Image: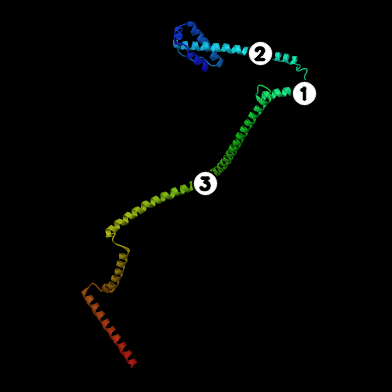
């Protein structure tokens, strides 16, 4: 095909232009294209028939037909020789006394084996050197095949190892997936519980924030500041206890005055009564002391 294209490219452009409008050439080109594409089992593509394209296609068709005709002549010659050569070879063998009918059966079978081996080794003759070269080539090919086989076996072993690891990993992943699927219902129940607890905690948070706001407002009302520490509160509590101890007798005295009647005269009588009780208590205390002294003497 490259020879045809080079032949077409080397043709004269003037010759192509001179036959560009020839209807016979167009018909011949179309017929040649149809035959070529039919032989390939395809349809002729659509294109525009211009003088230049017709000229190139016509030259290409002419060169192709010429080479096809030459190839047909050579093929016919080979066919004729293939028909004539067996008869001529048989005649030559008969003239030298080597006809197949006159040879022993073992010689015929050996020759047939030799021919089969030569055909198998793809050699053109049965010379020993040809057999040795073919055997050497076959040995080299065998060595190459063995090397490729060893390489393929090594790669197959690696792939088999990878496949086993992949199967083990797949089995582990399937087992993990099954375990995760079994863990889904408990996890969903736990999540629902967490959602409920979260809602409760959110409600508690709002409640605590509200209480915090209330306590903060209360502390602001009572004058609490950030300067008040735990030690200061303890000191204030101790001071309060001291005040309670100091004020307790005064409170007891004030409570005794609550028992006085509201009338001034009754209050005077009550005071006089208290004075008499006080004098009687002093007299009783003096008598007790006197008797205690007398007993001591």
Is 212 drawn above or below residue 231 in the view shown? above
**Front in this rendered view, residue 107 or 19:** 107
Q: CA distance from mark 2 to mark 3?
A: 86 Å
Do the residues bearing badges 2 and 1 touch, measured as CB atoms within 8 Å?
Answer: no
Say which residue label 3 marks: 183
SS class of the residue under badge 1?
A: helix
Instruction: Tell me the colour scheme of the image.
Output: rainbow
Q: Residue at x 60, y 13 (%)?
A: 74
Say which residue label 2 marks: 81
Q: Residue at x 74, y 24 (%)?
A: 110
* Disc nearest the viewer among 2 and 3: 2
Q: CA distance from mark 2 to mark 1?
A: 30 Å
Is 297 drawn above or below residue 73 in the view shown? below
Residue 56, percent from left and from top: 47, 12
Q: Quadrant of the C terminus?
A: bottom left
- Label annotation for residue 51: none
Is 37 drawn above or below residue 263 in the view shown? above
Residue 50 seen in this snapshot = no
């Amino acid at each position: 095909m490259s020879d045809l294209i080079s032949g077409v490219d080397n043709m004269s452009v003037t010759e192509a232009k001179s036959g560009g409008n020839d209807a016979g050439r167009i018909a011949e080109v179309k017929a040649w294209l149809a035959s070529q594409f039919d032989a390939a089992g395809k349809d002729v593509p659509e294109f525009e028939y211009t003088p230049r394209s017709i000229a190139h296609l016509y030259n290409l068709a002419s060169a192709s037909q010429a080479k096809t005709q030459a190839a047909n002549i050579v093929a016919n010659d080979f066919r004729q020789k293939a028909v004539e050569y067996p008869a001529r070879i048989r005649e030559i063998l008969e003239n030298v006394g080597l006809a197949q009918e006159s040879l022993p059966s073992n010689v015929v079978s050996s020759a047939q084996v030799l021919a089969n081996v030569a055909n198998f080794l793809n050699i053109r003759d049965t010379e020993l050197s040809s057999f040795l070269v073919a055997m050497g080539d076959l040995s080299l090919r065998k060595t190459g095949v063995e090397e490729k086989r060893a390489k393929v076996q090594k790669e197959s072993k690696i792939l088999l190892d990878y496949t086993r690891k992949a199967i083990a990993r797949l089995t582990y992943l399937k087992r993990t997936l099954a375990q995760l699927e079994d863990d889904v219902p408990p996890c969903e129940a736990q999540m629902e519980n967490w959602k409920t607890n979260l809602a409760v905690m959110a409600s508690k948070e709002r409640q605590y924030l509200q209480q915090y706001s209330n306590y903060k407002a209360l502390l602001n009302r009572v004058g609490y500041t950030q300067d008040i520490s735990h030690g200061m509160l303890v000191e204030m509590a101790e001071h309060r206890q001291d005040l309670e101890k100091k004020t307790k007798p005064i409170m007891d005295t004030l409570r005794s005055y609550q028992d006085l009647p509201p009338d001034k005269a009754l209050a005077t009588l009550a005071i006089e009564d208290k004075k008499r009780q006080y004098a009687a208590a002093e007299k009783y205390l003096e008598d007790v002391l006197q008797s205690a002294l007398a007993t001591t003497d």
